[in-house]
Amino acid sequence: MGTTIDTFNPTSVNFQHKMLWDIKHNYKSYYKNGVQVILSSGAVGSGKTLMACHLIWLHLLENPGAYVGIGRKDLKRLKSTLLKPIIAHAPMGWQPGKDFEFNKTEGIIKLPNGSIIQCFSWADGDLERFKGEQFTMFVMDEASENEEEVFTMIKSRLGRVREIDECIFLMITNPDEPDHWIAKNIIAKAGFIDGKRRDGDEDTLNFNYHVYYSLTVQNKHNLKEGYIEGLLKSNHAKWIERNLEGKWISFGGEGLYFAYDEAIHFRAYDYKVDLNYPIYISFDFNVAVGKPMSICFSQYINDTFHFFNQCVIHGANTTTVMNDMKQRGLFDYKTQYIINGDAAGWAKGSATNGFSDYDIIIKYLNDLKQFNAMRFKIEVPTVNPEIKVRHNTVNASFK
């Protein structure tokens, strides 16, 4: 069973204890000055989300009629990363549909005292949906995913309810680039860091801005055994600095795959396929203008990737590229083939008579098996991992 509002103990994690004390005691005189913007900047697994859930429930229960918005660019991920933990943090024994109303589709919670939580997302870029809203609290999950205009719009919808003094805009984020707008316009200008007032005046600092830092190691006692050790083993040094140590360091100017060094990680030489190992065929189904359909062939041997062939055709469909690869003898190796690539290839389309790209690939290779005894299997997820996860996984692969 997870931690509920009744069992939560903030004293075991330093930043949680400090943030909660400040908000419930020190901020009372600040609310008359406007919305209090709180940036919870921290490493993965440091307890940021749990702290947010606790603050949300306190606000709802202590302020009848409170209106809390929670938001993230992608609604599906918001429901998984924040709404689900909020429900799990409800008062002990409370059940959705029994002790409070819960509309799962819309992402709305209504309490008996009139307080409300509502989910918001803006992947379509439409920020007009916020006009007319009057939040008493807003929690933005994964804040660094967003442009500053999202922050500005949401902030303008806070601080308008006279009956409730507490008015908080809580932003949860992992660190990002030091030139990110959050670093430049929130962290650099914050009047308070970890509850301590910074030296400076109102011309250079905003004393309605508060930053709290959190580290994974500070929350180790609440994490699964081996969690931190696993991350240390599977990620690149710069990723560890940013995401375990909570530093806003730069991967900068080095591209998305900053860990790649051509002098170390690339070798151009004639490659001979080793039939003792499988061949991976990886598909990318982009067929828009300027984005050809592309496939690469590789083997993974002794912790090394060997990319030895490719197929890139503009304006091609799946059958066309399969025929091209067959004619070039790329399916003739007497070893197992493993098919992987973009999960979008599972989508069924009208242009292909209701078949997905992978349906077409599977049928093509099954037909081919009758002639050359080709062996293959499909290893493609139903959903692509998040972009950041993809980047981190690739960077971690470089030694």
Image: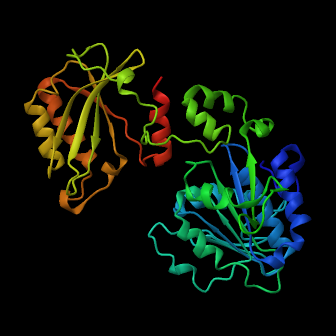
**Residue 375 at x, y percent in the picture:** 25, 25
Instruction: Identify whether 113 is placed above or below 36.
Output: below
**Does residue 26 appear in this view?**
yes
**Residue 49 at x, y percent in the picture:** 71, 53
**Residue 152 at x, y percent in the picture:** 59, 72
Occupied quadrant, residue 323: top left
Q: Residue at coordinates 57% horizontally, 84% vertically from top-left?
A: 131
Pick whichever, 141 or 338, lies toward us: 141
Occupied quadrant, residue 183: bottom right
Q: Residue at coordinates 63% horizontally, 83% vertically from top-left?
A: 133
Outermost residue toward the right in this view: 25
Q: Residue at coordinates 73% horizontally, 41% vertically from top-left?
A: 215
Pick whichever, 331 or 208, lies toward us: 208
- Apparent side of residue 301 relative to residue 58 in the rendered image (left or right): left
Its colouring scheme is rainbow
Instruction: Identify whether 69 is placed above or below 246.
Output: below
Pick whichever, 11 or 202, lies toward us: 202
**Does residue 47 appear in this view?**
no
Instruction: Identify whether 31 is placed above or below 222.
Output: below
